[in-house]
């Protein structure tokens, strides 16, 4: 949020506040503060994942790399967006004697938010909320602003269930204050959408993102249009609306090209990657390869060839090439994967990749290469049943090699 996105009292179009509802909400806020203020040290690994995996398809026994096929939601990018203190204008917003103190508290809270000190930021915004309710009444710009950023703080520290009522109330209050087509309403709607996605309320999240998208389109805020399209595309993907997801991602790309609405190459790479994943799901393998390779090229140039994030893209390229019948290119991608896995995780951490390579080698009758892969897998496996299954594959490959050699001898 930048200072240009100021809250303007002159644009208010507010309804009479519901005092009984506001009273209940304030009581709920106090309850949340008491119950959760000590719980900010939640491990990040416990946060909900944006795992949008594909169902399995097959090339013989080769499965879609579902663990790799996750559209990138980019909600965490909000953490990298610095937020500035807004300018409140209009009669009755701040008495002059209190303005300096309030602005100082806001600046301190936003510094904490931008640095990742979420506990401190939320505590200050909670104090401001009570100050502003006492001073201006519940139905005010300042209270709506505080609710918005308390919700933002809880989103950033991963406590999405707590963030939801704050975000929802910020949306409601800002609509009352500014009407339903105001930029501030859109800003709160996108926060609400992020919280809803994170608690698996995908249909409601899609509604929030689409409402925000309509507002940003109306006010011609192109970078935010691109951002909302990206988020709606990810939600469509997760609820298996792949055609709608593809349309959203392709429009993001169009906005970026025509309006230069994105200056981060890694974000462009994620858009290419997500389009590739959707096309893979739609079995448009040739086009999927084009987008995935473009994404990989950007990531290699930006992050280096040995970055762990390249693995998911290489995995999908290899699968798509196999589906297209390009065995050599599929093997090339799997070989690149093994190199990256060796650099990142060390030796003997590539059993799944070796298994996939073995399947491709076997399909093109390169049984010795397939055998070598399976033997490497056997060395890495600890589970007894898995070792038995791999040993049976090895025995089968040895018989195939003997048959192949015998057939070659017959031709001599």
Image (cartoon, rainbow, N blue to C red):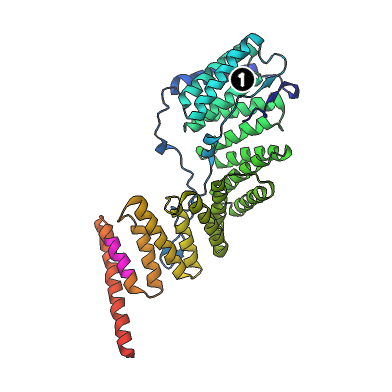
Q: Residue at x 31, y 77 (%)?
A: 400
* 138, above or below 321, in the image: above
Say which of 142 and 202 sits in front: 142
**Quarter occupied by residue 185:** top right
| Res 389 visible | no
Residue 72 is inside the magenta segment: no
Q: Residue at x 30, y 68 (%)?
A: 372
Q: Residue at x 53, y 16 (%)?
A: 127
Residue 158 rendering spot, x and y as whole percentages: 47, 33
Residue 128 rendering spot, x and y as whole percentages: 56, 17
Provide the residue span drawn in magenta: 370-378
Residue 273 rendering spot, x and y as whole percentages: 54, 53
Label 1 sits on a secondary structure element that is: helix
Apparent side of residue 402 relative to residue 40 in the rendered image (left or right): left
| Res 388 visible | yes
Q: Which residue is under mark 1?
A: 143
* 149, above or below 340, in the image: above
């Amino acid at each position: 949020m930048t200072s240009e996105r100021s809250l303007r009292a002159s644009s208010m179009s507010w309804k009479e506040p519901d005092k009984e509802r506001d009273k209940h909400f304030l009581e709920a806020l106090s309850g949340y503060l008491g119950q959760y203020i000590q719980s900010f040290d939640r491990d990040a690994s416990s946060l909900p994942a944006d795992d949008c995996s594909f169902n399995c398809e097959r090339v013989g026994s080769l499965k879609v790399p579902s663990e790799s096929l996750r559209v990138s939601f980019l909600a965490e990018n909000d953490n990298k967006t610095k937020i500035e203190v807004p300018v409140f204008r209009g009669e009755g917003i701040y008495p002059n004697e209190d303005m300096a103190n309030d602005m100082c508290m806001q600046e301190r809270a936003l510094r904490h938010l931008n640095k990742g000190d979420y506990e401190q930021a939320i505590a200050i915004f909670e104090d401001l909320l009570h100050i502003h309710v006492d001073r201006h009444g519940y139905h005010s710009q300042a209270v709506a602003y505080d609710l918005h950023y308390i919700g933002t703080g809880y989103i950033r520290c991963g406590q999405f269930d707590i963030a939801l009522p704050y975000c929802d109330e910020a949306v409601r209050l800002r609509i009352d204050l500014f009407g339903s087509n105001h930029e501030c309403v859109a800003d709160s709607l996108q926060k609400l959408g992020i919280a809803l996605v994170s608690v698996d309320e995908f249909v409601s999240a899609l509604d929030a993102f689409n409402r925000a998208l309509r507002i940003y389109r109306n006010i011609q805020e192109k970078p935010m249009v691109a951002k909302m399209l990206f988020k709606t595309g990810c939600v469509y993907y997760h609820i298996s609306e792949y055609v709608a997801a593809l349309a959203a991602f392709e429009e993001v790309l169009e906005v970026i090209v025509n309006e230069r609405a994105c200056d981060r190459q890694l974000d462009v790479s994620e858009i290419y990657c997500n389009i590739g994943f959707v096309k893979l799901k739609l079995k448009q393998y040739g086009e999927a390869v084009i987008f995935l390779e473009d994404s990989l090229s950007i990531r290699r140039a930006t992050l280096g060839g040995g970055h762990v994030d390249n693995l998911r893209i290489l995995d999908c390229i290899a699968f798509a090439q196999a589906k297209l019948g390009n065995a050599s290119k599929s093997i090339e991608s799997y070989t690149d994967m093994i190199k990256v896995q060796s650099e990142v995780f060390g030796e003997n951490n590539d059993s799944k990749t070796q298994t996939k390579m073995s399947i491709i080698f076997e399909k093109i009758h390169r049984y010795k290469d397939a055998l070598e892969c399976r033997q490497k897998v056997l060395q890495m496996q600890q589970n007894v049943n898995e070792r038995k299954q791999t040993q049976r594959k090895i025995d089968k490959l040895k018989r195939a090699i003997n048959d192949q050699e015998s057939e070659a001898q017959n031709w001599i």
